[in-house]
Amino acid sequence: MPNIVTKFERARPEDVAALAPFGSATVHEAQGRLGALDSRLKPIDRTMRLCGPAFTVLGAPRDNLMLQLAIHYAQAGDVIVMSAGEYEEAGCFGDVLGNACVAKGIAGVITDTGVRDTQALIELGLPVFSLNVCIKGTVKETLGRTGCDIVIGGELVRPGDVLCGDADGLVVVRREDAARVARLSQEREDIEADLIEKYKAGRTVIDLCGLEPVLEAKGLTTDL
């Protein structure tokens, strides 16, 4: 099998666009509490958001050769997602590669290792999610693969699946489920908006969440 695979089915652009407005927690809940990556993977700036099809990369710890190749071969709109053994003590990605990503129209970068030059990356505006921030450099020695199934943050990510990320974390949506999950996410947002309005009107948590029979069954007592 070739090291570099670029031809794979990506989620349809219209489905990616439909998912993009929703927060990662909403998407996670809407698809049955599935797909959440390890909560340690966070954006380097809380304002960063991403949503796009995964250009998957299998790399080696403390080595960014495959990440550089991924930037070369990925398409505009892709999210580069690199699994590199959860090695935190290396800055495999920084401002120079960040500028290369922006020049190509890459939608974001996710890695389970460290990144550096974070202030410059924040100013650049490229969404970057990582396991750690670390100034230590890397080598360019080990061939891996792109366009393959990987496991990152405890979740299987296939090439072309959708990654949604924000300050709360990351969630993966199967490419064939993207349209359905977008619809379910909107339904969930509508329900929550209705609940918020009812709370503002004076309704209570016990009332709206149907907690009274649950609390009664558990023997809750109060001094009211």
Image (cartoon, helix red, strand yellow):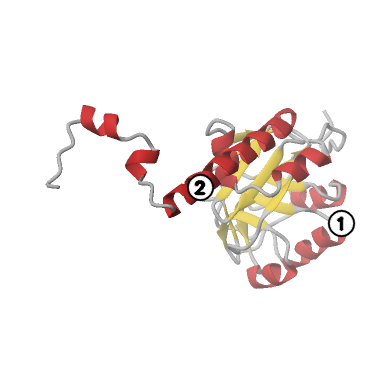
**Relative to 115, is 175 on the left or the right?**
right
Q: How many marks?
A: 2
**Relative to 88, is 60 on the left or the right?**
right
Res. 91 visible in picture: yes
Q: Mark 2: which amino acid?
A: Ser
Disc 1 packing (10 Å; few <14; some 14–19; many ≥20): some
Residue at 56% x, 33% y is 34
Q: Please tell me in which quadrant of the rendered image residue 82 appears.
A: top right
Q: Mark 1: which amino acid?
A: Lys
Q: Nearest the camera: 97 or 211?
A: 211
Find disc 1 in the rendering and name its residue.
Answer: 104
Say which element carries label 2.
loop
Alpha-carbon distance for marks 1 and 2? 28 Å
Say which element carries label 1.
helix
Q: Nearest the camera: 88 or 54?
A: 54
Disc 2 packing (10 Å; few <14; some 14–19; many ≥20): few
- Residue 64: x %, y % from top left: 72, 53
Q: Compared with residue 209, is residue 106 higher up or lower down, i.e. above or below?
A: below
Find disc 2 in the rendering and name its residue.
Answer: 39
- Residue 146: x %, y % from top left: 78, 39
Does label 1 or label 2 sit earlier along the sequence?
A: 2
Q: Farthest residue toward the left?
A: 223
Res. 53 visible in picture: no
Residue at 82% x, 49% y is 77
- Residue 18: x %, y % from top left: 74, 42
- Residue 215: x %, y % from top left: 25, 34
**Relative to 45, is 126 on the left or the right?**
right
Residue 4 got which mark?
none
Residue at 64% x, 65% y is 116
Q: Quadrant of the N terminus?
A: top right
